[in-house]
Image: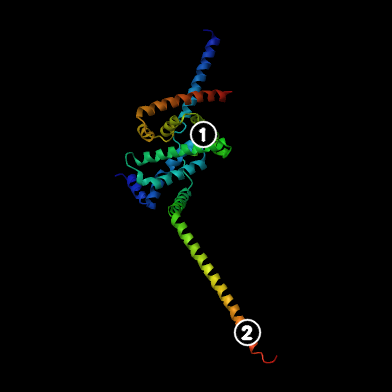
Amino acid sequence: MTSEGNKKSKSLNIYRMQKDQWINNVFNSMQGSDRAKPNDELFASILNAIDEKNNYSFYQQNKRWIMVAASFLIIINTSALIFRTKVENHSRFQAKNDLGKYQNVVTSYNIYE
Amino acid sequence: MDLDKGLLKLIAKKDQKAFESLYKKFSSKVFNTALSYTKNNNNAEEVTQDVFIKIYDNAHKFKGNSSVETWIYRITINTSINCINKLKKHHSIGLFENGLNTKDFKHPGIILEKKEEALALFEAIEYLPESQKTAFILSFIENLPRQQVADVMEMSLKAVESLLQRAKKKLRVYLEKKFDERRK
């Protein structure tokens, strides 16, 4: 083998050695590393998320009953409102009638005409 | 009964102190694994949050066939994979582009002299198929014993070893190319 051939194979060997060395370093790059830790506030936000989820699932589980109760309240309130309006209308009508009667009575006592 | 299983029984009864103890013991393992998958701090925290909510909700379903740690690792891996798939889906329709930008990911726990090599390692892991990636992360980043990796992945020890061999071969091919690119 010529000296140039020797040089070439030597540099090829060096190249291969460097490559293997680098790849081994990459494979071992996690050795001696520390575990990454999450943010200190993460636990609090997990508890919040659990609370929110529980509240939501309480709503989901009782959705039907909540809707029945809401409808019942709406019906009661509407009925009360209708009843109140009727009573008011009735008393206004009554008052008007009474006024009519009163005027009649008064006119019949008009002695200065 | 070991301590972790006892904690899980208490968590099934919604005991918050037991939940906090379990969180303190496993949060860094969960976060670290999630970080190896997602390569993004915010996404890893989101995965950690989801994992602990699942633990809280499903503690009563734990049958005790495996260790609590194995069970938690299994939940972490499934949640991480779901998170990545969700991000990929959003990425494909043009949402959350930054969530998948993992090229410059620097693991916060790595010592300074190895930062460059670790960057190359995480970049290479990205090209592995799912099961090889899981086996590699659990074995070489989480440093779990091979039998536990097999338990987490619900596979035989032989199957895990074969996955690791194939993963290393693939990584080597990628890293050889990377080495040549660096020299240019």
Residue A101 higher or lower than A11, as above or below: below
Q: Residue at x 52, y 20 (%)?
A: A15
Residue A85 screen position, x and y as percent:
55, 70
Looking at the rendered structure, the kind of residue marked 1 is: Lys
Same chain under badges 2 and 1? The reply is no
Tag 2: amino acid = Asn
Q: How many residues crowd mark 1 within 10 Å: few (<14), some (14–19), many (20+)?
A: some
Q: Position of residue A105 (x, y in %)?
A: 61, 86
Determine which residue is flagged by label 1: B115
Does residue B82 lie above or below A93 as drawn?
above
Q: Chain of mark 2?
A: A
CB under 8 Å between discs 2 and 1: no
Q: Say which residue appears at 52% left-offset and 13% top-offset.
A: A9
Q: Of all residues shown, which one is farthest toward the top?
A: A1
Name the outermost residue toward the left: B1
Q: CA distance from mark 2 to mark 1?
A: 107 Å
Residue B121, x across and y down, in percent: 49, 30
* Total marks placed: 2
Q: Which mark is residue B154?
A: none
Identify the residue position indicated by label 2 in the image.
A104
